[in-house]
Structure formats: C-alpha cells, structure tokens
Amino acid sequence: MTPDRTTTSDRKTILEIRDLQITLPKGGDRPHALWDFNLSVAEGEIVCLVGESGSGKSLAASAAMRLLPEPHVHVSKGEIRLDGTNLLALSEPQMRAMRGDRMAMIFQEPMTALNPQKTVGWQIDEVLRLHTKLDRAARKARALEILTDVHIPDPASTYNAYPHQISGGQRQRVMIAMALVLRPRLIIADEPTTALDVTTQKQILKLIKELQAAQGTGILFITHDFGVVAEIADRIAVLRLGEMVEQGPAAQILGNPQHPYTRKLIAAVPSLRPPPEKPLSTEPVVLEARGLRKTFGARGGLLGGKRAPVVAVRDLSFQLRRGETLGVVGESGSGKTTVSRIVTRLLAADAGEVRIHDGDLLSATRAELRALRKDIQMVFQDPMASLNPRRRVVDLIAQGPIVQGVARETALARARELLELVELPAAAANRYPHEFSGGQRQRIGIARALAMEPRVIVADEPVSALDVSVQAQVLRLLADLRDRLHLSLLFVTHDMRVAAQLCDKVIVMSKGEIVEAGPSARVFADPQHPYTRTLLESIPGRSWEPPVHSLA
C-alpha cells in the first residue's frame, strides 16, 4: 500500500531552488556538493529530500537558510527564492530578519541546538523579542500558547525548565515550537526524528502534519528513513552525490521507483514481515540471565533537589542459544541498554546472575572475568566514540588477543584476516578510524569483537545511525557471520523493522520489565501485550511495504 496524496499543482510556490550549485574546497572527493539542483515547495506541502550521507541534502538545507560554512563551502551558481525573493541577494541583516519570521529550521539534535544555560521560556521569548514588538506579558502568553499547540504536557513547567530537565521527545517539541512561534511560511526539518523511539516519532510526525495543515506551511523534510517518508510525504526528491536522480509524487516514487539508485534505497528498507517461524532450537544455551535487577539511586540535581531512585531492570531473565539472535526492543528508558551493559559487566547489577561457559560473570573475580570475557564481546552504537582515534585499525583489532596472551605477530595477522572477513580492504589495516565512513567503522567494531573468538556478541543499536543502504549491508554481514561462525547475538534496538528481519526471538521491555517474549514471527503477527501493540502501531509507514526490486 502506498500513500494517497492530493495534488499540489494549484498551490502557491513558497520555496523555489533553481540550478543551484554548491562548490566544495579543493582536494575533496568531488568538486561540488550539489550540481544543477532544482526543487520547489508549495503552500501546505511536505517535500521529502532523501539520500545517503554525503548526498548533499543537509547542505541544500543550509544553503536555503544561508548557513553554509562560507567561504570554503559556498553557492557558486543558481537562485534560492522564498515567495519570489532571491535569498542569495540579501544582506546578512536582511537574511537574519527572514530567519524565524518567514522561514525556520528544525535541527536533528535539539540538545546541541538549544542553549543549555537558558530556560525553554527564555529561548522562545528571544525569538519573539527579536522579531516582534510584543511586550513581555504578551510574549510569555504566546510562548505558552505555542507550547500547548505542540502538545507539551505541562507548558508552564516546561517554560521554566532547562533543556536537560525534559525528555528527548519534549526537546524536539520545543524546537518545533521555536520554529513555528512566528508562523513562518517555510519550515526546513533536518532529520528531526532520527534518534527518537517509534512512539515519540509517531507523535512528532503527527504534530508536524497537524500544524502544517492548520497554518498552510510548506515543509522541506530531510530524512533517510523511508518509513517516515511513506508516512508524511506529498512529494519525494532523491539525491545521489549532489545530483537529483528522481523526484515526483510520493505514491509514484514509493510504489514504482524508476531510477536504479532509488530502487536500491527502497530495496534496502527492512520489511515488517519477519521470516517464517523456525522450529524450536535444540542448540545448547550459551548465555543465560537470571533475576537481573538494577536500580539507579537517588542523587542531587544540578539545581538542587533530588532525583528519585529509578528501577532500570526488574527481575529480568532470558536464555540465548547457540546460533540464535535474540532482540531486545523497547523505548528509551525501558532498560534495554542497561541489560546489555550488565550482561557484559560494563555495569554492576544489584542482583542476579549472568551464566556463560559455566561461570557467572557478575560474581567472577578479576582473573575469572578476564577468562569469561573472551566468550562475550560488545559492538557499540557509536563506533567513533568506542575506537581509539590515535591507534591504527590493525592495532585496535589485535589489542584484545594481545591482552589475553596471544603473541603480537599472531594477533596482527589474525586482525588482517578479520578485516577481510568483514569485507574491508587489506589497506584498511594501517589507517586510523577517522579515515573511514560510519558503516566501515562499524565493520571495524565487529572485527574487533570477533578477534576474541566469542560465543556471544552483544550489539547495542549498532545500525541506528547508519543510512538505510549501509544499514542493510551491516545487518547482512552480522547475519552471515552468525551463521558461518555459529555466533549468538543479543541485539538491542528500537527499530522494529530491523528486529523483524534479524532476530529469531524478541523480548519486549517496558519500564525495566519484560512484557512480552517469543519468536519474532509470532510477536509481530499477533502481539499479546498492549505495549507491544502500541510499539508496532507507531512504526512510521507501517502500512507501506517496499516493492521488491533487484539490487543490481
């Protein structure tokens, strides 16, 4: 099923980009970030701009807002018109007046876009103070009104809160409130839902659509998530390495893409239909958790007062068999990452056992733990943060075996073999982490985990930050390595599409407890718990199934 959108041909054009060319500094991988780029957004229309990292989509947004890092990256040709006004011809003071008033931007990461030293109310008030002649009381009333419009649960409390005192979903709502407070004609949203859980994501997308429909705002929505595209797009434009390869109505692009690159992107989207349920495994149990419990104690807040104790994991038990993938799914705060850190003993538990190779990780002595850790390794969400930037890749991979007593030359030779196993070139061995793409760094993280020849790999959101095509490659690699090496995977994710395709079984966590568990095919087809049903119903574009195309 594909979305059915109304035509926008009779609506007035708000944003028109003509023959745009953005030049990059010399020595880059290509001379231009964008080449002969043409795009328009009409009143009340949502245009989704999609493409992989490096395609130029975020630079297109920055160019429209006149926020390019000039002079190194600059517009060398073309026009950007907002209601007929050429933005590239405006002075900086004139452009400042346009931002916020006539056009606004919702950034990907609100915690970095919001000032941590100022309250939410102060930051919304600043927009009104700079662009209107309202007095203080009127500005506060308008700020509370817009916080109510974006469905903040307690507007008055949020108005006086600092960004760190509210949730990620609420911070994104505050960013939307700041963008909408002056009722601009155009909103540019740059990956505004990428890091959000499916339930929060659904709320934000619904909110954007409601406000856009009520105010007739045009929206340029930048994303690599085709589920989001299927949920909200009127039109879709596809970018590849700075070149527009395809654009058209959402139903046409999603249902019958014409360009091979578009077909490749859509074919990489994981289906929500899991493979058929397998017979019950008779393989031995390689990892067992029994009665895990973890409470984060009360502590003083930055502004006084105390934070109440939080029970992150409550009496949690599970088994993982050889060659099996067990998915741990749930929203932020459900306790799933805490579980992954307890079973690798990166975090101490208050109670319980983690049995692996006839030993208990949680009660092991330092010497016993070193021996047991060979059997369980972790792949982290952010490989750049988990890889030492000062060490060559071959040394990073060999480090674990060397610590375990393996001869240095033997460990280095094995590291080079592992690079080949995760499909990286031999030349990668002597390079540093920053010289690789995100997907390649994740492959390095997998190779480092495999170097210890573990029985179990714990993967904590290992593909959440990757483009859909790179995500598909990493997931295929993990599945292939699992089958070839008889590995067991404990796979932590909030992406239900990924869980459906990779995991044999899933456990669904809410507030530190398992609310549902079973084979993926059964849980996805017939969820029993209301929370599981809510998660599945919140998946963006859940009624859309990617058409089957060859990846060739």
Image (tube, rainbow, N blue to C red):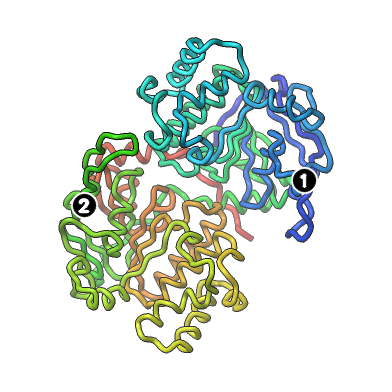
Q: Secondary structure at mark 1?
A: loop
Q: Amino acid at mark 1?
A: Pro
Residue on which disc 2 sits: 294
Q: Tell me the quadrant of the picture where the C terminus can be found.
A: bottom right
Residue 191 falls in image quadrant: top right
Q: Secondary structure at mark 2?
A: strand
User: Residue 530, percent across and down?
Assistant: 27, 36
At 18% from the left and 75% from the top, the residue drawn is: 358
Q: Please tell me which of labels 1 and 2 falls first in the chain.
A: 1
Query: In the rendered view, does 174 fall on the left or right side of 292?
Result: right
Residue 438 falls in image quadrant: bottom right
What is the crowding at mark 2: few (fewer than 14 residues within 10 Å), some, or many (at least 20)? Answer: many
Query: In the rendered view, does 136 fall on the left or right side of 487?
Result: right
Judging depth in this view, the residue of 410 and 543 nearest the camera is 410
At 68% from the left and 36% from the top, the residue drawn is: 248
Residue 527 falls in image quadrant: top left
Instruction: Tell me, yes or no, whether the two marked residues, 1 and 2, touch with CB atoms within 8 Å.
Output: no
Up-down relation of residue 509 to residue 276 (above or below): above
Marker disc for residue 300: none
